[in-house]
Image (cartoon, coloured by chain):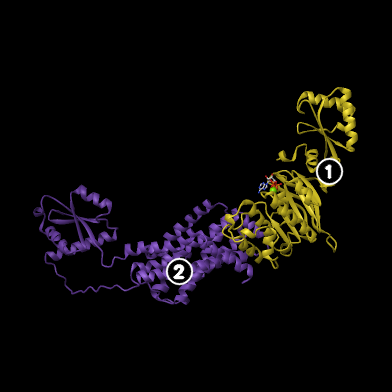
Amino acid sequence: MLTNSFRELVKCRVREVFREPSAAFFVVAVPMLWMLILGFAFNKNGDYSYPIGILKEGSVFEQPIVIQNLIKASENDPHLKIFEGSTEELAHLFNRGTINLALAAKDGAIVFEFDPANREARESRLYVNDILQTGLGRSDFYKTIDQPRSRPGDRYIDFFIPGLLALSILTSSLFGTGMTIVAFRRNNLFKRFLATPISTYELFGSFIVGRFVILALEMTTILVFGWLVFDFHVAGSLLDYIIVSLVGTSAFTALAILMGSRLDNVGAYNGLVNLVTLPLMMLSGVFFSLTNFPDTLATVLRYFPLAALVDSLRQIALEGVSITALAPQLGVMVLVTVVCSVIGRAAFKWY
Amino acid sequence: MGETHENLLNVDGLVKNYGKQRAVDHLSFSVNEGECYALLGPNGAGKTTTIEILEGLQHRDEGRVSIFGKDIKQNRTEILPHIGVQLQETVLYQKYTVKETLQLFASFFPEHVDLDSLIAKLDLDDVKDKRLQKLSGGQRQRVNVAVALINSPKLVFLDEPTTGLDPQSRRNLWDLIKQIKSENRSILLTTHYLDEAEILADRIGIMVKGRLIAEGSAKELVLKYCGAQALWFHFKEDCGSSAAQEDLFKLQTELPWLEKAKMKDGGFIATASVGVEAIQSLVRCTDKLGIKLTALELRDSTLEDVFLELTGRSYNDADQ
Ligand SMILES: Nc1ncnc2c1ncn2[C@@H]1O[C@H](COP(=O)(O)OP(=O)(O)OP(=O)(O)O)[C@@H](O)[C@H]1O
Ligand SMILES: [Mg+2]
């Protein structure tokens, strides 16, 4: 397949990115931006807090002693953030998400008000309750020791970087390749190609292989930036990591070829990409683990192409799993590549 | 089809429908080795559709098309390396320079001409390292033509190759086409310039509403439909006025060759087999009838007149 025409076609794909500054920007700058935003938003080591509201009635001294204790404790506890206010003021703070727990003394008891479905609110409740009870002299029956642990690999950013790479592969393949296809069709360039002896497979192959070069750029950016800024490491083999990325790129480029196989309108293609990427992103564990879904659903979702890619990258990077153990995920991606290419070729409109 | 395919291209009974509309209607013609054949016709006549069917780009509803003695449908891979194609509307890859574009297309063919000399032939030397997006319309058109010639094709399809070219570039392209002919290669050309067809084409096919209504060399067409010369004359009033029409009617009763006189440029034009005799008889007759001629010219007939004769309309306002 390494014919002269194939080489020229691949060159064409690569030059396209480097000659379109905005395309290069999306490939390089956007992932870095994502990493910075999400890396710092979720990577506050030990920097967590429990924002709680206390119903204020009269002066401090009119509050029950437990609450006075709590307020006093908060002065030395960096994690405890207390907001005092009237019922209306607290309701307002709740609505804005400033507090996730409110407490008030009522008939000799403390009333905790919070949304039980909110995990952080439940944590706040446990934390505050502990302070209240120990402040009054409760002691634990059995000694426990908390040992802080922060090793690269356990942080949100470590979870996120493989997902980001997968996401970047998805969007840049769908936009990069698909837009080109749609524009070429609109410009009658495919029609012109059709009047030359090049084969369809050569043309499609050049789209995929051209993408590999862009992938190298994306991967380097994400890995080097992740390493420099967040000390990110791939626990498993880097070669495995690259191979999985190549397979993923093939799958999404083939998907782009299929999605762009009949359209000649950039706007319509854009809409189609959004239609496809949004659910893929939400349902593939890029941002949050699939374990948040019900078990049966999660099992199905794991075989979505993006999930398969995210999952394999994560297993290699975080757990050091070797590529041989990832056969099912790779199988899914290879299948997507083949099926999309074949249907895309059959459906392909040359003009 | 014999062993020697003297007809490089043979089209027989070609039909193409777009839904209910028939774009090509039982079209038959052929192009010989070393021949330049021009398809002439108003907008929408079906020229592009025809050419694209021949190039194997569009599907046909009926008819036979053979190139080098083979059907394009079944023998694409054999035929494509030896034909050259310039589409009426293509936007080549805009981020590529002229040279890179030619390199790209050259790589598609088993053999290709020397790129630098092709660039020189199309006067693209000065812009060869410029990206297509920075070229003028005429320069881009020349790149399209260059791409069509990259594989040194035996048969070249040029769909309005000179549209948008300045007079100098047009003339250069004419020279190039003549050179291709001299190398015993063939060209199928469409154009809206009648002078171009007259100069370049060995044979011309006039197409109207998907049909070929006349065919022959420019000279043959002129002789057949107009006579070599035509007499143009003008009365006091313009040809549309009733006075002028009446005068013409009076003359026609005396001079039967005026039967087919047509309105043109404010006067009338009629074919004259022997120009001088026609002038003499017209002058005699107008004198006799007391009709005043304000202008009288003997014109060499052109394709324009053929077109007028065949369609009843002048070429430039014959859009369908
Ligand atoms: N894709 C299409 N779908 C429907 N009708 C079409 C299509 N392409 C062309 N036609 C119609 O077929 C007829 C012939 O078009 P064609 O492009 O062959 O004309 P042409 O002789 O090349 O005209 P021009 O001189 O303007 O280039 C026109 O009436 C046109 O409207
Ligand atoms: Mg046309």
Percent position of residue B274, x then y: 90, 38
Q: Check the residue under mark 1 and report the chain it is in.
A: B
- Chain yellow in the figure, letter: B
- Residue A38, picture quadrant: bottom left
Q: Quadrant of the C terminus of chain A?
A: bottom right
Q: Amino acid at mark 1?
A: Val
Q: Nearer the viewer, residue A95 or B265?
A: B265
- Residue B151, picture quadrant: bottom right
Q: Nearer the viewer, residue A151 or B106?
A: B106
Q: Amino acid at mark 2?
A: Met
Percent position of residue B177, x then y: 75, 56
Q: Nearer the viewer, residue B196 or B1?
A: B196
**Circle on res. B222:** 1
Mark 2 Cα within 10 Å, few/some/many (few <14, many 20+)?
A: many
Query: Mark 2 and mark 1, same subunit?
Result: no
- Chain purple in the figure, letter: A
The answer to the question of whether label 2 and label 1 lie on touching residues, with beta carbons closer than 8 A, is no
Q: Which residue is mark 2?
A: A219
